[in-house]
Amino acid sequence: MRYLIRRLGFFVLTLWAAMTLNFFIPRLMPGSPEEALRERLSKGGSVVTPEQLRTVLAEFGFEPDKNILLQYVEYLKAMVTGHWGVSVGSSLGVPVTDLISSALPWTLGLVGITTVLAFIIGTFIGMVSGWRRGGLIDGVVPPVFIVTSALPYFWVALLLISIFAIGNNPLLPNDFNYDQGLTPGFNVQFIGSVIKHGLLPAATILITAVGGWILTMRNNMVTTLAEDYVRMARAKGIPGRRIMFGYAGRNAFLPNLSGFAMSLGFVISGTILVEYVFNYPGLGYMFYNATVSTDYPLLQSLFLLVTLAVLICVLLCDFAVFLLDPRARTEG
Amino acid sequence: MSAIVAGTATPAPSASRRPRGGLFRAILHNRKAMLGAGLLILFCLLAAFPHLFVPWLHGDPQAIGDLPLQQPSSKHWLGTTGLGQDVYAELIYSTRESLIIAVVAGLGATILSVIIGVSAAYLGGAADNLLSMMTDIFLVLPTFPLIIVLATYAGKGNLTVIIVVLILTGWSYGARQMRAQALSLRNRDFLESARVRGERRSYIIVVEVLPTMISLIVANFLGAALYAVLTAAGLQFLGLGDPNSLSWGTMLYWAQNQGALVNGLRAWALAPGLAVALLGVSFALLNYAFDEISNPALRPVRRRRARQH
């Protein structure tokens, strides 16, 4: 039980750290948001009175005259209660939460599915490759996936576009989430279009993400196979497949599971680039747009949200480890 | 983009003291290491003497030419950009900045992770708890979004900002490994004897502990450098770098902005990314090879032995 409480404590602490970073970064960095906002609004041709500007910035939680500690406490309160402010970017005045909720399903669908898929496929290939050590699969797997794991996400995306989606009669579309003529609905045409548009981005994430998990799983497997209990199982004459899954694979999988949560941050960074390349209107693309239009509230909310997502995954993996690994239960 | 890639579950606890030169011999006998080292040396040459690879070029490699958007030809090996710049010349001259970012950020992150990891293991107690907690938090925080937030606030385009940010976000994974290995070394006899001899703590850490950890430190540098290469290229590709600088990420940014792919100029759109990928691959290969060297269990086995199972 102590294990779970400790992990929950870590969850809260990290979330707090992310919020604190979010609060202090804009206040410590050169250049004030006020300046940036005024400059951009006047460039856009709209005339803004100082009062309006102040109101917008107050929404953003930026009140330079107030005590900084007081601001900090208020900021934390607003974040926890879901008052994430309004956008000051291209969609001025729209609550950040609205913007995010419109983009969230796309990212969740695309990234969620492909990441889990990559993890499962990677773990399986890694297990087999480690089991058949020195065999044909194992001769090919490490070198190939060392290479794919070092490829930049956006380059794989560009490569796939140049192969499949360029020319007079492209095989697959290279941008957006569905054909723009269609109205979203639960019908074959729409779903088919969504899948078609998701194929290339999904392939990109799969290709680049799978390598890491294959390599770690293979190496864990190799280390585990040297353990005495595996030799014991062999000596007892237990069939190979059962040793592979039930003895070695099961134990080699545990570090990989914690690694899954840890490396999620890398996957998310990759998807920002992938969504940017494919103009896929998910959170990553929104993140990019927020950067371009220096939409600070949106940027910070997205960062917080991504942190929250990673932390939830870490927590879920911790629970899974708790269930799977008796050591985690007894050690405390 | 994963620095986690080559790290095995736990660093080999049996980092025995190797005789001098053993590490180099190990590298020479590892095919992955040789390939990785070869690529890296090539990139170093490109960075150090770019003019040798573009001998016909006199002056600015970014010079604007009068033939924009050309397909690759004998005159322009990789075609030209929307401003008529020669892509090949730009590519060669960009090596320097990309390599500098990788090496400086990789070194910085490694030094930081050694300091934090080793001191956590050595100080123990509350300090260890605090440092480990900090490491874990930084490990979980999604770094790339954080980098984007930081780079946006700190002003786009500054090379120093990018490197500092890469260091600040890239140390945590290494620190964790360093701590694990330093902990496993803590009660070794040779350290005990140094303690009995009455050596100072700083002496023990610098002269006795660090040399034993050298292969892990090198592996860590390679991982951090890989992370730096990929992340920096990603940042520049998104337009968060200096748009006038000569680097692969910036080339990709312009290629994307001037519609290289849409115009069918595959060489221009893909070559800089390929360079990034190759540099990344060279770091990754070396990293994996170092893993094999420091953890003998992972070394490739000969076919004949494997068949007996």
Image (cartoon, coloured by chain):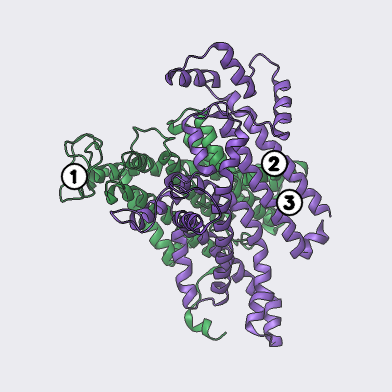
Chain colours: A purple, B green
When the figure is inspected, residue B87 is found, relative to residue A139, above or below; the finding is above
Q: Amino acid at mark 1?
A: Pro
N-terminal-most mark, 3 or 1: 1
Q: Residue A320 occupies which quadrant of the picture?
A: bottom right
The x and y percentages for residue B29 are 43, 67
Observer-nearest of B165 and A191: A191
Q: Amino acid at mark 3?
A: Val
Evaluate whether label 2 is on the same chain as label 1: no
Within 10 Å of the Cα at label 3, are there few (<14), some (14-19), or many (20+) other Cα atoms?
few
Q: Which residue is mark 3?
A: B196
Q: Residue B54 occupies which quadrant of the picture?
A: top left
The x and y percentages for residue A301 are 61, 35
Give the Cα separation between the discs numbered 2 and 3.
Answer: 41 Å
Q: Which residue is mark 2?
A: A14
Q: Which residue is mark 1?
A: B55
Q: Residue furthest bottom?
A: A237
Observer-nearest of B222 and A166: A166
Q: Are marks 3 and 1 in contact (CB under 8 Å)?
A: no
